[in-house]
């Protein structure tokens, strides 16, 4: 699958040396290295480290146009969805959701590097700041409502691993929704209802939420009932 467009790329520059990454025991066989080498040379990217691997892609941290970025490339033998993800992110960026997308093609996605930890890891901390956690839930729910109103369904909100929290600056908690590769444009969306399920039904994260926020069974039922109305009257538009 390697590209033939590399003839014009600068060669012999150690900045573009990717041999260490190729040897990685986990991602060594998952990436089209020829394609990646071509990408970093053409776009003058310096790779810094491997930051993630999922079912669809491998994600690197790098420097591109003097910015720290995340570079997602498709996994060999997996469905290639990077172009789709880039085009959806371009749309969601218009209403301030998702990492900012810088460049994308059929073979790569260069986007803002999101610093932080995912919701699951955030909740594994011993000491939890109740007010901060409420801000995180509120922020996540608002972003999910925005996605619903723009008719983009993320598709994987319920798992929680795509919600990244940056609480370094306590006065400016940031929440990012990442990984839009399974997202769809469509009339019926499940972002808000999935987020409610994640925080307030019977998952591990919900149980932790009840403990931290001291939510009663009654309050939980009220939340669920309001969400049912939202689903019926706002999402499905049944009158
Ligand atoms: N913009 C980003 N900034 C920082 N880290 C990121 C970014 N995008 C992805 N990551 C990291 O890389 C990991 C894998 O990325 P992502 O979830 O997009 O891959 P995937 O192959 O689509 O995974 P999945 O199997 O969950 O669908 C993420 O869990 C996260 O840790
Ligand atoms: Mg994914």
Image (cartoon, grey):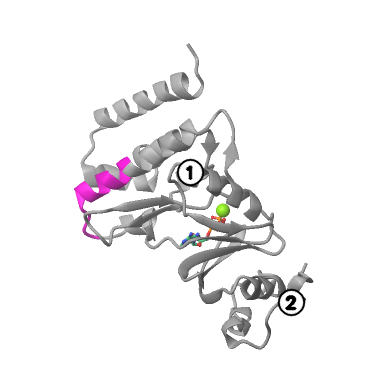
Q: Is residue 193 above or below residue 236?
A: below
Residue furthest top in the image: 239
How many dots with numbers? 2
Q: Which residue is mark 1?
A: 94
> Residue 123's x, y, as percent?
32, 55
Q: Residue 194 falls in which quadrant of the image?
A: top left
Between residues 203 and 213, which one lies in front from this camera angle? Answer: 213
Q: Is residue 151 above or below residue 102?
A: above
What span is in magenta?
Answer: 126-138
Q: Is residue 118 above or below residue 209?
A: below
Q: Residue 39 falls in which quadrant of the image?
A: bottom right
Q: Is residue 30 above or below residue 216?
A: below
Dot 2 crowding, Cα within 10 Å, few <14, some 14–19, many 20+: few
Disc on the earlier residue, 2 or 1: 2
Q: CA distance from mark 2 to mark 1?
A: 35 Å
Between residues 89 and 182, which one lies in front from this camera angle? Answer: 89
Q: Quadrant of the N terminus?
A: bottom right
97 with respect to 220 (left or right)? right
Q: Residue placed at 68% from the left, 73% from the top?
A: 38
Q: Which residue is mark 2?
A: 8
Q: Main secondary structure of the magenta part?
A: helix
**Is residue 93 part of the magenta span, yes or no?**
no
Which one is closest to the eye, mark 2 or mark 1? 2
Asked if one can make out residue 226 in the rendered structure from this viewpoint, the answer is yes
Asked if one can make out residue 202 in the rendered structure from this viewpoint, the answer is no
**Is residue 131 part of the magenta span, yes or no?**
yes
């Amino acid at each position: 699958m390697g590209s033939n467009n590399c003839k014009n790329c600068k060669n012999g520059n150690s900045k573009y040396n990717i041999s260490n990454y190729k040897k990685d025991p986990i991602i060594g066989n998952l990436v089209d290295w020829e394609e990646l080498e071509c990408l970093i040379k053409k776009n003058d990217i310096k790779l810094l480290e491997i930051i993630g691997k999922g079912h669809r892609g491998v994600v690197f941290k790098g420097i591109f146009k003097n910015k720290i970025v995340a570079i997602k490339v498709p996994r060999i033998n997996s469905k290639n969805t990077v172009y789709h993800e880039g085009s959806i992110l371009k749309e969601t960026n218009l209403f301030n959701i998702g990492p900012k997308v810088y460049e994308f093609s059929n073979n790569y996605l260069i986007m803002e590097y999101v610093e932080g930890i995912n919701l699951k890891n955030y909740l594994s901390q011993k000491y939890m700041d109740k007010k901060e956690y409420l801000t995180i839930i509120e922020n996540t729910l608002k972003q999910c409502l925005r996605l619903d109103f723009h008719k983009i369904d993320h598709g994987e909100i319920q798992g929680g691993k795509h919600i990244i929290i940056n609480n370094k600056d306590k006065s400016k908690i940031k929440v990012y929704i990442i990984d839009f590769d399974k997202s769809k444009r469509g009339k019926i969306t499940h972002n808000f209802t999935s987020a409610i399920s994640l925080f307030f039904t019977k998952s591990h994260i919900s149980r932790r939420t009840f403990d931290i926020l001291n939510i009663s069974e009654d309050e939980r039922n009220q939340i669920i009932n309001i969400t049912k109305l939202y689903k019926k009257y706002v999402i499905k538009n049944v009158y």
